Amino acid sequence: MLELQNVSYKTQEKQILYNLNMKFIPGHKYVVIGTNGAGKSTIGYVIMGLSSYKPFEGKILLDNKDITSLSVTERAKLGLTLMWQEPARFDGLTIENYLTLGGKLTIQKSELIESLEFVGLNPKLYLNRYVDKTLSGGERKRVELASIILLKPKYVILDEPDSGIDLMSLNIINDVVNYISQYGGTPIIITHREEMVYNTDYGYLICAGKILMHGKTEDVLKAFRGTCEVCEHPNVPLN
Ligand code: ADP
Ligand code: MG
Ligand code: MG
């Protein structure tokens, strides 16, 4: 289980997260939903342990181990992964290099090919392409999804996987989410869009850095559609 205990985060100017308690239990698929600016990405960054989001208050536990003081790399080794809202570029690295961690991972060529096919990238056209600005944002997201297929992390946070949706079909994201739960991983989808929640079981509704409610996805969705006293119109993006 991935657990946040009393997690708060503030910058010098502003409190962003307020005393969050969250549990992500293997065997379920999760959504973290809220409008723009609610604090969703910040939750992902704090869970991953990005150094610019330290220090924060509270604790993060991964399979009963306190990982609060661990680095991003150490957390990744324990099976935590974040797919960025805006995936990074790696100038000079081909997709093949990127997916095999520069040859450090021993992956059969056939597995590599299958992972690209899974995310709708033709291996013949893409294996030797560079993970740089010549790839669109949607293509880079697909490459990151292929790396999830290959690495099989235990907990996968997908931050707005549908942004760039023109280029990437919702079906592919759903297939990857199902694949993660089939190998025993726990997918956590961060989104502000209803379309993204239907393939999840449980969720958290975030508003202005707080958990407004959590529970079964259908109940969370009802609350998300409603009006909240904190931000008044939760379905209208704040920025
Ligand atoms: P979401 O992902 O839900 O759209 P974010 O987590 O990106 O929301 O941001 C939550 C709020 O915190 C926003 O108001 C954002 O402007 C602010 N914020 C996030 N990171 C920082 C930072 N490093 N410094 C100042 N404000 C920040
Ligand atoms: Mg946002
Ligand atoms: Mg965000």
Image (cartoon, helix red, strand yellow):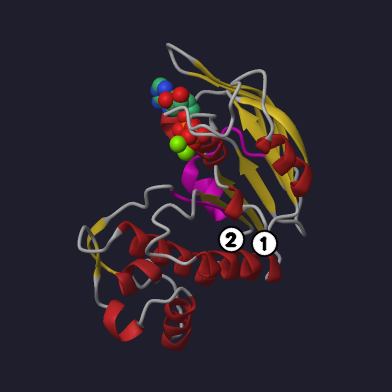
Residue at coordinates 58% horizontally, 23% vertically from top-left? Answer: 208
Residue at coordinates 58% horizontally, 26% vertically from top-left? Answer: 233
Tell me, for residue 150, which label it has, or none: none
Q: Which residue is mark 1?
A: 185
- Name the spot of residue 87 as percent of width and height, x first: 37, 52
Quarter of the figure with the C terminus:
top left
Q: Give the image quarter of residue 66.
A: top right
Ligand 2 image-quadrant field? top left
Q: Are marks 1 and 2 in contact (CB under 8 Å)?
A: yes
Circle 2 sits in a helix, a strand or a loop, which is it?
A: loop
Q: Is residue 42 visible?
A: no
Query: Magenta span has 80?
Result: yes
The answer to whether 26 is drawn above or below residue 55 in the figure is below
- Which amino acid, mark 1? Gly
Residue at coordinates 77% horizontally, 59% vertically from top-left? Answer: 27
- Which amino acid, mark 2? Pro
Q: Is residue 155 left or right of residue 168?
A: right
Mark 1: few, some, or many residues within 10 Å (few <14, many ≥20)?
Answer: many
Tell me, for residue 153, which label it has, or none: 2
